[in-house]
Image (cartoon, rainbow, N blue to C red):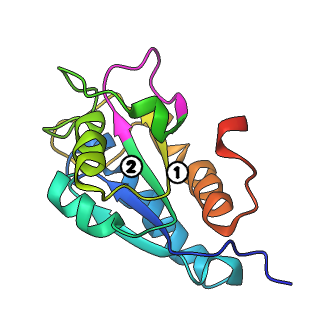
Amino acid sequence: MSVHPPGRRIVIGLGNEYRRDDGFGPLVVAALAERRGREPRLAAAELWVSDGDPARLLDLWAGADLVVLVDAVRGGDQPGRVYELVVDDVDRPAGGTASSHGISLGSTVALARALGRLPRRLVVLAVSGREFGFGVDLSPQVAALVEPVARRAGELVAGTGGDPRAA
């Protein structure tokens, strides 16, 4: 019996590896790529890194059953806090953005909905970042979350993580 849910499953790490904590998403994807060799349940999952451009995101996730976006965000109440959101939670376009990217995720989701290009399920795993200046090292609070968030993303795409709304 397969433990894999049907359909295309994708993890997208958003960010720029040369902007300190903004490199969180790409590092989580790298950790998942390393795990994939040891964990067959992850073999079918697609792993991507994106700069967060809405058009590229829509292309990556079009037709997907499940997309897990991983990102570091500005402005959380404490650096290193993890947030798990489902698409309904990021449904409203915002005037500003908590993201380090130019257009908010809410605006991208609204655009995808208008174009009929939303994945069936969209889960966002975000951490509050602290440092977004030039450099390659994550802040210690964010670096400590690479493996736990990679594990959670892996559980979600492998279908072993339960209902993301229950988390």
Q: Residues within 10 Å of mark 1 (few under 14, many from 20)?
A: many
Q: Which mark is residue 24?
A: 2
Horizontal side of 8 relative to 53 (left or right) equals right
Residue 7 visible in this rendered orientation of the protein: yes
As drawn, the residue found furthest toward the right would be: 1
| Residue assigned mark 1 | 146
Tell me the kind of residue under disc 2: Phe
Name the residue: 55% across, 44% down.
145
Is residue 77 within the magenta segment?
yes
Q: Depth check: 147 or 41 in front?
A: 41
Q: Which residues fall within the magenta stretch?
A: 72-83
Residue 130 vertical position relative to residue 29 in the rendered view, above or below:
above
Name the residue: 61% across, 85% down.
37
Give the dominant element type of the magenta stretch: helix, strand or loop: loop
Spot occupied by residue 74 in the image (x, y as percentages of width and height): 30, 26
Name the residue: 86% across, 84% down.
1
Residue 125 vertical position relative to residue 25 in the rendered view, above or below:
above
Name the residue: 26% across, 59% down.
57
Which type of secondary structure does the marked residue at label 1 adopt? helix
Tell me the kind of residue under disc 1: Val
**Mark closer to the chain start, 2 or 1:** 2
Q: Quadrant of the C terminus?
A: top right
As drawn, the residue found furthest toward the top would be: 77
Spot occupied by residue 16 in the image (x, y as percentages of width and height): 22, 53
Q: Residues within 10 Å of mark 2 (few under 14, many from 20)?
A: many
**Tag 2 and tag 1, C-beta contact below 8 Å:** yes
Horizontal side of 92 relative to 155 (left or right) equals left
